[in-house]
Image (spheres, grey):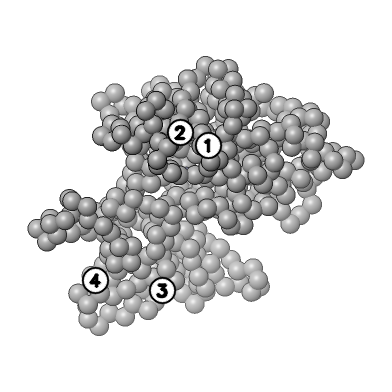
Amino acid sequence: MTSEKQFARDLIDFIYESPSSFQTVRNIKAALLRGGFRQLNRNLNWNIERGGKYFVTKNDSALIAFITGAGKVADNGFKVIAAHTDFPALKLKPQAFVKSPDNYLKINVETYGSPILNTWLDRPLSMAGRVVLRSNNPLLPETKFINLKKPVSIIPNIAVHLDKNINTGKTYNKQNDMQPILRTVQDNFENDNYLLELLASHTRTQVEKILDFDLVLYEATQGEIIGAQEEFISSARIDDLAMVHAGVDALLNSGVSNATNIMICFDNEEVGSGTKQGAHSPFVKNILKRIAWALSPTEKDAFFRAKINSFGISADMAHAVHPNSPQLHDSVLRPKINAGPVLKYNANQKYTTDAISAAVFKSLCERAKVPYQQYANRSDISGGSTLGSILSSQLDFRMVDIGNPMLAMHSIRELSGVKDHYYMKKVFEEFYKL
Ligand SMILES: [Zn+2]
């Protein structure tokens, strides 16, 4: 198997084992520990050294990993790659079950982020997340993670015979049309404790200990490499676990450089990043300040000087030209799958890229011998945004927005390129090498 295909295979396995932000962070943690990184606690004193490998987590759903630089922090700064652990999904509401009059037990969900709703129909769905248990200290309940790892639910489509609009612009109501069925039940079925019993048996605890949960449904089928030339990756959650995977791998392969190399995995990008574990929080700034203080305890201005010498890459997926809807793209900026990473531009600063940060990323691609492409929306389509502008304004850094070209963004099953994923890893490795 080629290195490209092997790396794509690794990504597919990583995504399959990461059905919620919590499992994603657990898997990254395990890889970092295997790679010699040490976990730091945010509530303890840090004793960090130059050339050391460390990571911190927040809410079990966001993570910052770093290798402290060998050089003076004020002169060499930070090299940051940032991606996100979350993805559009169906999240269970607190009263999670609805018994329908027709004897189905349905799951009471709300949409998280902006999924393409109709792609969630007829897909075997499983459930994952965290369960929070009573402990001796009411302020510090215990957490257990759960991944059912088997298809337990489905949202069935409507037969074409019953809804003649199904192929001509059918719309989906998030409350009425997106409730998955879990099982059939009899008239006398009591559902009050059904979920808690399910969770208790999977986390080997008692029902009485469970106080709450954060659970999502996810596509139960694993992704695969597809296409006549085996050049495409077809999987759930490519946005943005592909960038998380490439970034973490690059950091694991990176040695010590003069700057501090940092990989950030934020949560909640899909809902605007405005949470304590999202890009719009003080999480990163606080960690960078602590690194600067630890490495330069006598220089009060080290953090502020380091920022001037720092650079950030906001890594989130990009839109490739759609073969069946090419008119949705700009007439000349038309990224293609397997033609290299994409620089994302937006005059209204939904992307943080400017000429200087773009020039830096282009130079990185040239050094890594990787082709690059450029993207801007059609001027009459507002398009999406990501965490780059939020983070660069938080950190006061130079920063660029980039990502790999993909199709079907926010579908339950997205599509990207085998070659592009390997290209991105090479560019990230080049960045951390500097
Ligand atoms: Zn994204």
Q: Nearer the viewer, mark 2 or mark 4?
A: 2
Residue 104 badge: 4
Q: What residue type is labelled 1?
A: Ala
User: Seen from this angle, which residue lies furthest bottom?
Assistant: 188
Neighbours of disc 3 within 10 Å: few (<14), some (14-19), many (20+): few
Where disc 4 sits, the SS reads: strand
Query: Could you tell which of marks 1 and 3 lies nearer the N-terminus?
Result: 3
- Asked whether residue 300 is in view, the answer is yes
The residue singled out by tag 3 in the image is 95
CA distance separating discs 4 and 3: 16 Å
Query: Could you tell which of marks 1 and 2 lies nearer the N-terminus?
Result: 1
* Beta carbon at label 1 within 8 Å of ligand 1: no
Q: What residue type is labelled 4?
A: Tyr
The quarter of the picture where residue 96 lies is bottom left
Q: Where is residue 247 in the image (x, y as percent from the top left)?
A: 55, 35
CA distance separating discs 3 and 2: 43 Å
Neighbours of disc 1 within 10 Å: few (<14), some (14-19), many (20+): few
Q: Do the residues labelled 1 and 2 touch (CB within 8 Å)?
A: yes
From the viewer's side, name the closer residue of 53 and 411.
411
**The N terminus, quarter of image:** top left
The residue singled out by tag 1 in the image is 347
Where disc 3 sits, the SS reads: strand
